[in-house]
Amino acid sequence: MKKKAFCFLLIFVVFISAYGFTSQQEFKWGGHGYDPALKGKNSSRFAARPHFKDETVIDIVVNDKKTVREVGGIDLISSEGVQISSEYCAKTMRHIEAPWACGFNKAKIQKMNGSGTMKVFNRSNKLLFKDEIDFDAINQLFGNKPKLKSTENQLSVPEKVGLYFQHSQNDNNMPAIVFTVFAGSGCDQVGDLQITKNLKLNQPNIYTKGGRIDILEIQIKGYKLKKATTSANITCPAVIQEARAIIELDDVMNNQQLQLNIILNNQANEFGLNHYDDVLYLNPMTVSQVVSWNPGENMPARAQGLGFMTKSFQLRLVQVRLNGSYAHKSDIGTSLRDYVRNLGYQPLDEKLQGYPRMNPLDEFIVFVPNGKDIPEEFRIIGKVNYHEIPGGDKIIDVGIIKKKAVDPFFVRWE
């Protein structure tokens, strides 16, 4: 009997020490957790703590309603774009609503700096949610030394920067380029991203034999960062601070072909900037540290081509509409595209290089060449023949109307 009691006590002690009901160090954030068994002061949505057996591993514990059933993995992404993935994920206890713990190599977390993003996935690699994470706070608690420590007189230099278009503050018909870095969390003090630019005229074009090109060289210097001191009496908003810089392009738009050299950590990232037919195209050429993308979407792994339609181009756009009912099982989409093309209109996804392919039955936008009217009100322009299944050959009226609101920014597809 004594032997059984001793074994039970031993198992209980191991269980307690393994899953966090001891005084071991933890960094908690994210508010109260979901698990009913961890109510009160022990409850938090997220926690970082040393693995109970392996001192080279740090567990990230997730206690959220969306992760009750399963967690397949966690990705951690620093503000500089460094990403690491968990090596395993397991339930911390056997009951169904227990939190999940995902293990990370301590040395890899030690290389993460500042604030970043945590993405939580299920076993099918579907994103459950994402939240912010403070790598400096975790490293300080567990005795790691963050790689990057900035003072008031030093600049934090990122490993990667984001880039996107926005309307120019000088001329709404032209874009500006925004550079951005995810630099800190809610209570941190983050300065502007400091850059310099220099327009170099008539430089050798390495992408053409014997050609010359103007190069706009942009040096990314860094940003000032003052980390907030951690205190139990201070509640910081769950936001990620950005360091930004804006380059106006209206002063270089007379140049129809320009090369952008973005210098970061002494390495050049080259883009082509082409301006013709009232549309501006940004084309990644040799790029490794700059990610160009649409800020309304998740940042991709590599740079994307971008486009901007000027006002004069937008004024030549109309929307094509069908006037009548039709069956979905038909060739009307193809027939409609062929019909308007034969009338001299250009579908927008054919007019613009890399514009996303449109569905003619959804919102079909076409470019109107000079000499054709652009009606303010809906106007019938003809009839299109198509074939339904079943039903046979049909005819339907087609009309156009001026496109009142157009998003001038678009991501180009290869």
Image (tube, rainbow, N blue to C red):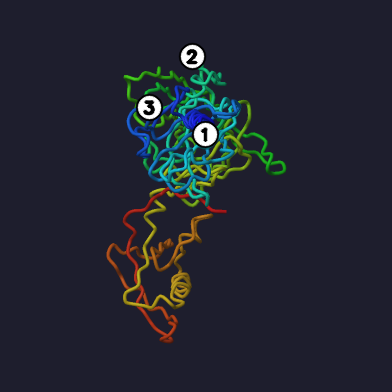
285 relative to 335 in the view: left or right:
right
The image shows residue 229 at horizontal and vertical percentages of 40, 17
Q: In the image shown, does 249 or 254 lie closer to the viewer?
A: 249
Q: Residue at x 41, y 40 (%)?
A: 166
203 relative to 142 in the view: left or right:
right
Q: What residue occupies the far bottom of the structure in this picture?
A: 392
The image shows residue 121 at horizontal and vertical percentages of 49, 45
Q: Is residue 382 above or below residue 119?
A: below
Q: Amino acid at mark 3?
A: Gly
Q: Residue at x 43, y 19 (%)?
A: 227
Q: In the image shown, does 147 or 246 lie closer to the viewer?
A: 147
Instruction: Mark 3 or mark 1: name the one nearer the start of the chain.
Output: 1
Residue 62 quadrant = top left
CA separation in Å, label 1 and label 2: 59 Å
95 relative to 401 in the view: left or right:
right
Contact? badges 3 and 1 (CB < 8 Å): no
Q: What residue occupies the far front of the structure in this picture?
A: 1
Q: In the image shown, does 303 or 299 lie closer to the viewer?
A: 299
CA separation in Å, label 3 and label 1: 52 Å
Q: Which residue is mark 1?
A: 4
Q: Is residue 402 above or below residue 283?
A: below
CA separation in Å, label 3 and label 2: 18 Å
Numbered label attached to residue 151: 2
Q: Which residue is mark 3?
A: 186
Q: Residue at x 57, y 21 (%)?
A: 147
